[in-house]
Image: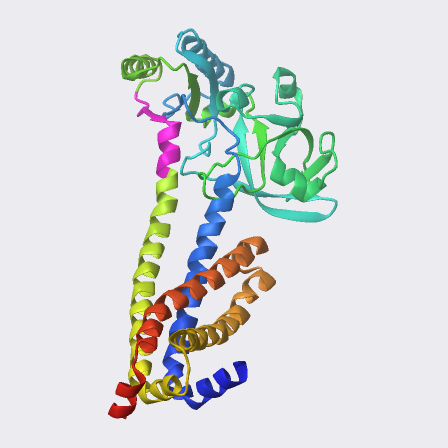
Amino acid sequence: MFKHLFKLIWNKRRQNFLFLSEILVSFMVIFAVFSLLVYYYLNFRKPPGLESAQVWSVSYKNPYKTKNTDSLNLIYENLRSSLKSLPQIQEVSFSSPNYPYSSSTSRTGITYKGKGYFPIDFFFTENDYHKVLGMKLTEGRWFNKQDAAGENGDLVINTTFKKAMFGEGRAVGKFIEDESLKNRRKVIGVVEDVKVEGDYLPVKMGFYQRLDTGSFKWVGHILLKVSPDADAAFESRLNKLLSRSIENSNLEIKHMDEMRDSKNENTIIPMIICITIAGFLIINVALGLFGVLWYNISQRRGEIGLRRAIGASGSSVAGQLVAESLLLATLSILTGTFFAIQFPLLNVFNVPALVYIIALLLSIVFIYLLVIFCSLYPGRQAAAIHPAVALHEE
């Protein structure tokens, strides 16, 4: 049977070229869309690593130009005490501008045993930073007051950093160096990965470093863990308190869960656009397949009538047309698979190979279902052709 089908396809190779081209283009587009969807879905399944609910961020411009570090520290320590005295505020931490879901990034390189790692996100934090964000330690500890005496500053790294650099072994107590190879820093803890760029994007290697005593000269962000009863009225009182404490500072209060939603929207919108474009393409391809198959039936009425006259059943005629369509789709899929398999082999876009493999399998299933759907009705129309009518017309 397959030999006969190949012979029929080869004899009509010019007519089938359009069919093969449409399936091939559709397959590559569907593969790209499924790769994007699988990539986002696998990232979304991973835990966020923090609790963004009831976390507010305060951005301000530092108005104090004093060179006296002790005076500046005293001013902001008094501000910290004022904030913690409010019953609605549970935790307070100053932070560098690249806190989760912000639009700021800070990256560097690290060397360990002569091997370089780049890029790596780094964050300047305080002792209560992990409490504000609800971060979970998997190994070692977080910073405390005793770490302020360190010469180069100890580090807390995330799980992705640990696996890349130390594998499954213990990371606490190990020393790493920066790109200049001048500063050796000790790892004192490991935290779960935090999705700083939203739920749909992957976590990069990262580490956390404690703010030193001179950091208030440039730090301009405060993270607050507030109680569930903190409402708009409290936010207004908080704004007034901060405005009195830090004059001419251009205050801005943001809710981290809203920032998270905004980050997710920025990721989802391009995905929706791609799906919409692919959807229109698939509709056009489906209509094209209907047209091509319908045209083939009209051109083969005599052949179909002769087959029916010598005893072929309607179901066998319909099955032949569907089988021809599936065989043509298989040829296109094999060609498309050759190109698609290059993506995981060449590690294109630095995406895990599993994403491309799952997308490839989904694309194959989708194309087969599309071809079956588009060929069933023309196949039924071919099966309904009466042999006497077809032979009379011929």
- State the extent of the magenta-drawn residues as a range: 248-262
Q: Quadrant of residue 79?
A: top left
Seen at 28% across and 83% down, the residue is: 298
Q: In the image shown, does 61 or 393 lie closer to the viewer?
A: 393
At x 45% / y 75%, what residue is drawn? 323
Residue 119 in the magenta stretch? The answer is: no
- Residue 319 left/right relative to 202: left
Vertical position of residue 70 compared to residue 19: above or below: above
Q: Residue at x 52, y 81 (%)?
A: 1
Q: Position of residue 64 (x, y in %)?
A: 39, 21
Q: Image height check: is 309 above or below 192?
A: below
Q: Which image quadrant for residue 137?
A: top right
Labels in figure, total: 0
Image coordinates of residue 271 in percent, x first then y, are 37, 51
Would residue 251 be counted in the magenta stretch? yes
Left or right of 291 on screen, residue 174? right
Query: Which one is in front, 71 or 246?
Result: 246
Colouring rule applied to residues: rainbow
In the image, taking residue 5 as reference, residue 281 lies left or right, namely left
Reply above or below: 200 against 278: above
Quarter of the C terminus within the rendering = bottom left
Give residue 381's position: percent from left, percent from top. 30, 74
Q: Nearer the viewer, residue 14 or 138?
A: 14
> Depth check: 135 or 25 in front?
25
Q: Position of residue 81 (x, y in %)?
A: 45, 9
